[in-house]
Structure formats: C-alpha cells, structure tokens
Image (tube, rainbow, N blue to C red):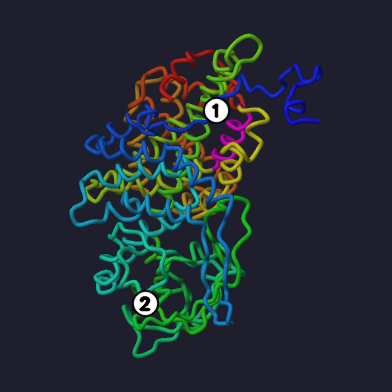
C-alpha cells in the first residue's frame, strides 16, 4: 500500500475527538502587581507608593511565562545531595536545577534578601520589599526560604558589631553566586540557620550541641562546635546562625556564626547527613547536619543565644505572613482565571451565584492577609514609632498564627474551584496545597505561637494596649466589629488575671480576626470591610468557604482581584 493510500482517512476517522475547548489558557504574561488591586492599595496605604514603578517591573517579571517555567522546573527537579565526589573526597554539596539558580538570581537582584538594611535604604524599604516578596512567593515559594533567612539575619548580626562589620557588607550584594567559596570573595552571600535538634524541636533549651572556645572565648571569638541539628534550613548557604551550649552547666544555648568555607579556603566541619523528604517546599533543600569541630564565632553573650536570635525569628515570622498572603493570592488568581474562562450549565463559572460566593470568600481572606502583611512590614521600618514597635511584638505572632493556619484550607478550596484540573500536578495549585502547611510549622507551630502570645500578656502588657489601640482605630465603622473588639479586650483582661493555655489558640484567632477586620474597615472599600466582618465575626457564619450567612456584593469583591 502506498503512503498516499495510508494517509487517506477512513470512514471511522471522520470525527475529531481531541479538539480542546472550554478550557482556560495558561495564566502567563500577567503583571502580578497591576493585576492585584488590593496589593496596590495596601502599598499606598502603608507609605510605599514611591515604589510603584519598581514593583510594577517586578510584577511583570514574576508573571512572565519564563519565570513560571523556572518555578515548575525547580520543583519538578528538586535538590540532590552529593556527600562525596567521584574519588571519595567529602564535599557535602547540594546540586540544584539551573532554574532554581535563576529564581535566586532574580530575587537577589531585586534586593529581597537585604535591600531594607542598606545604608541608603528608603524609609519605606521594608514595606516595598514585603510587596515584592509576596509576589515572588506567589509563584515560587521554595527559593524564598534562603532569601528570607538572609533578610532576617541582619538584626541578630548587629548584636555583635565586630562580626556585623565583616559580614553585613557581604549580605548587601545583589549578584547571586552559587559557587562554594570563601564568602569574602563572593559578590553576595546567603544565610541559613540551624537551631532545632532531634530531642528538642522547638524546645531549644534541650539542645546538646557543644561549643568549646579556641582561646579565651567571649563575644566575637572563635569556638569549635560539635553536635547535630535535626533541621538545618538551606544547607547550601554561605553561613549559618547556630545554637550550641558552651558548657554542660549552661541553662540556655549561645548563638554562633558558622561559615561553610573558612577564610583560608578550606571547608568547615559541616557534614550534611541527608536532605529532608518534605511534603512540599520541594525546590528548597532542608537537611540534617552534623558539626565536627566546626569553626564558629560567638554572636552576643554566652547563654543568650535565644535572645540574640529572637530578632531573626521575628523577621522570619513576618515573612511567613507575607508568604501566606502570597499563597492566598495565587489561589485566588488561579481560581478566578479558571472561572472566567470555563462555562458550565449555560454560564461562565464566575457568574454562577454559588461559585461567585466561594470566589469572593477566598478573595476576602487574600485581601485581609495582604493588608495584614504590609501593615506589619510598615511596623518593622527602622523609623517606626513607639506604637508600631509595641504593635509588631504582638501582631506578628498573632498574624503568623492565623494567616498560616488559613493557608492550607484556602489552597484546597482554590484548588477545588478548578475541579479535576486543580488536583493534577500540571496546574500550580496542587503544588501550592502541598506547600501551604510549611508556613504554619516554620518558626513556631500553632501551640508555640499561641503560648508565646500568652506569655507576652504577662510580660509586656503595654504591647497588648498598643494592639487594642490599633483595633480601635476602626471603631464606629461597623457595630459588629465594635462588639468584637470589646470581647477581645475582655478576653485579654481575663487571660492576664488567670492564664489558661487551653484557650490561648481561641484568643489568638479572635485577635487576628479583629486586626484584619480593623485594617479592611479602615483601608479597603466599605463593602469589603463589611463583608469581612459579616463572614468572619457573625455568629451565624459558616465553617467553609462560600458558606455565607448573608448576601453581599460578591462581584464587587471579586473585581478587585
């Protein structure tokens, strides 16, 4: 039979069964800043409007098809540990797909790792950085881990001025280099941290890692560190903050700066035992490590490691809130994109009332998280007044608890809006769903955060007064909200008199909802603030997204997203 004969269709091939229709196009080529009305409004509301042009450029970058392909590849081809080279030499290196390095390079060129700490940083630098960091997290959160830790390390470094004078200038560079080399020779460096151990987890006072002074010892001096860490975030970083005990009698650990490569070019005594096989966060390497006489330099006083590192923890908790807001934004953006391009039962999904309600409900949480993240970033600006300094002490853990707890359910409901497509790894929301829980675990799980809030009630009552003052800025805007603030104030007063750990989570949740409602009532259009109050503070509210107690103009809420 000739080739021409074989190419002729037979009667049975007269129908085309694989024509694709009623499917959305890929959501690429979208400027993630200009497409996000609430983010733009929050940037302006919290004093960073001058960063609009810069944020618009970055929004175009992260919304490009190329950037999203980097995100896919970095997650599909995760990091691989190489403990030895082919000849048997111990190397302890982590190998990444080239796309991961592209993501790191883009974020560091934007200054997401350090720009707010630069000597010439703008007064709104933390707020502008929060907006850009949120957009990076929206598309690819895994690489944001080392970016976040590098950003957060600077306040802890500054507690030891002689070390900060050496290391902080290295942080400020924006030219990413993946090379394993002496940090002094690199154009920019990244930091990680290693605090928790097998036997202790969040209870770092149970740590057994030891540090022995090389000489007389003391702040800024060299020690030899031996021990293990159950979680070392981003083991490919250039240096780490590590907790270790100086003596058996220490009741608390000390903080040390431990570089990967020593000034003489030799590798420090850091042994990567394995990479964690995580539920999500696949593009990022998390590891177990052992220190074998590793050189480290004491940061701060002996036995004061937790206090030294607490500012780093505060800023990484801030980044958890920002990352949670970015995750919610991705869920809303993808769900809305699908609903606007998919028809069912004679109408676009976005116009089906029950779907409109779900989308609007998801959008309310996304908007609330966005305003919360940027308000917290504003409170972390170096020029922040006393009110903001007190506010951030309480509002940061409160917001971290709630936004990160809402993340997994928000990701699931967003995924469900795509139906079967959402459940496949070909669409980004399956990856988001696996990613979401890490933010609730990282830098203090729910119980740790709630107990932190409880302890602060006894030790820092003035911070709670600042928190209540922040809520009361929206007094008179909505009677149901006013009632909620009164209840929160009463709950705080009772908790101070008789601390009850069993209700710490409930109070933290109520505080978080009060903060979000206050921000939306003050800064978002009235229908948005009122809808948030009715769907979050009403006694008749539902327990699932879209289970709405009252009708509201859902289309108006959706338009902003």
- Look at mark 2 in the image and give the residue it sits on: 298
**Residue at image coords 44%, 36%:** 369
**Residue at image coords 56%, 24%:** 24
Residue nearer the viewer, 207 or 442: 442
Residue nearer the viewer, 125 or 29: 29
Whole-number angstrom distance, CA of label 1 to CA of label 2? 49 Å
- Look at mark 1 in the image and give the residue it sits on: 335
* In this picture, residue 38 sits left or right of residue 531: left
Query: In the image, residue 14 lies at what x, y percent?
Result: 75, 17
Q: Does the magenta-highlighted stretch encompass residue 82?
A: no
Residue 412, quarter of the rendered image: top right
Mark 1 neighbour density, 10 Å: few (under 14) some (14–19) many (20 or more): many
Q: Is residue 508 visible?
A: no
Residue nearer the viewer, 321 or 279: 279
Helix, strand or loop at mark 2: strand
Image position of 69 with respect to 250: above or below: above
């Amino acid at each position: 039979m000739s080739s021409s004969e074989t190419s002729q269709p037979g009667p049975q091939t007269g129908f085309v069964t694989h024509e694709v229709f009623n499917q959305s196009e890929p959501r690429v080529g979208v400027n993630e800043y200009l497409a996000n009305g609430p983010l733009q409004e929050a940037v302006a509301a919290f004093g960073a409007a001058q960063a609009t042009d810069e944020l618009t450029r970055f929004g175009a970058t992260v919304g490009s098809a190329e950037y999203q392909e980097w995100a896919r590849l970095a997650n599909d081809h995760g990091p691989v540990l190489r403990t030895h080279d082919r000849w048997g030499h111990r190397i302890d290196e982590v190998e990444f797909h080239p796309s991961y390095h592209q993501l790191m390079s883009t974020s560091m060129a934007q200054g997401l790792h350090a720009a707010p700490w630069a000597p010439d940083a703008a007064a709104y630098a933390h707020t502008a950085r929060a907006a850009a960091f949120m957009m990076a997290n929206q598309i690819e959160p895994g690489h944001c881990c080392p970016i976040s830790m590098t950003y957060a390390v600077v306040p802890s470094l500054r507690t030891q001025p002689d070390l900060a004078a050496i290391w902080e200038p290295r942080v400020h560079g924006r030219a990413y280099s993946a090379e394993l080399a002496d940090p002094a020779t690199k154009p920019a460096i990244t930091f990680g941290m290693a605090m928790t151990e097998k036997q202790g987890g969040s209870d770092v006072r149970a740590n057994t890692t030891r540090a022995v002074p090389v000489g007389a010892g003391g702040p800024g001096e060299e020690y030899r560190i031996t021990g293990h860490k159950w979680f070392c975030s981003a083991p490919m970083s250039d240096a780490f903050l590590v907790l270790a005990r100086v003596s058996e009698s220490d009741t608390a650990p000390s903080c040390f700066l431990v570089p990967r490569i020593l000034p003489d070019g030799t590798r420090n005594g850091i042994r990567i035992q394995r990479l964690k096989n995580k539920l999500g966060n696949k593009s990022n390497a998390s590891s177990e490590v052992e220190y074998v006489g590793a050189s480290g330099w004491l940061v701060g006083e002996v036995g004061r490691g937790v206090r030294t590192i607490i500012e780093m923890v505060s800023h990484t908790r801030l980044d958890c809130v920002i990352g949670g807001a970015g995750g919610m934004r991705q869920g809303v953006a993808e769900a809305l994109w699908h609903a606007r391009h998919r028809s069912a039962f004679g109408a676009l999904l976005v116009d089906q009332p029950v779907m409109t309600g779900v989308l609007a409900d998801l959008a309310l949480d996304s908007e609330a998280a966005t305003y919360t993240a940027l308000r917290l970033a504003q409170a972390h600006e170096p020029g922040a007044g006393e009110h903001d300094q007190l506010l951030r002490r309480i509002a940061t853990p409160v917001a971290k608890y709630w936004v990160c707890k809402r993340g997994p359910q928000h990701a699931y409901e967003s995924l469900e809006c795509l139906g079967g497509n959402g459940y496949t790894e070909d669409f980004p929301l399956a990856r988001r769903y696996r990613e979401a829980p890490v933010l609730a675990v990282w830098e203090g799980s729910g119980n740790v955060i709630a107990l932190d809030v409880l302890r602060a009630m006894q030790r820092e009552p003035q911070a709670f007064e600042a928190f209540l003052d922040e809520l009361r800025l929206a007094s008179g805007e909505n009677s149901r909200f006013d009632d909620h603030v009164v209840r929160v104030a009463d709950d705080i007063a009772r908790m101070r008199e008789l601390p009850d750990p069993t209700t710490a989570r409930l109070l933290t949740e109520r505080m978080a909802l009060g903060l979000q409602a206050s921000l939306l009532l003050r800064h978002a259009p009235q229908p948005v603030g009122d809808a948030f109050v009715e769907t979050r503070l009403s006694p008749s509210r539902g327990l699932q997204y879209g289970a709405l107690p009252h009708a509201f103009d859902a289309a108006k809420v959706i338009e902003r997203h």
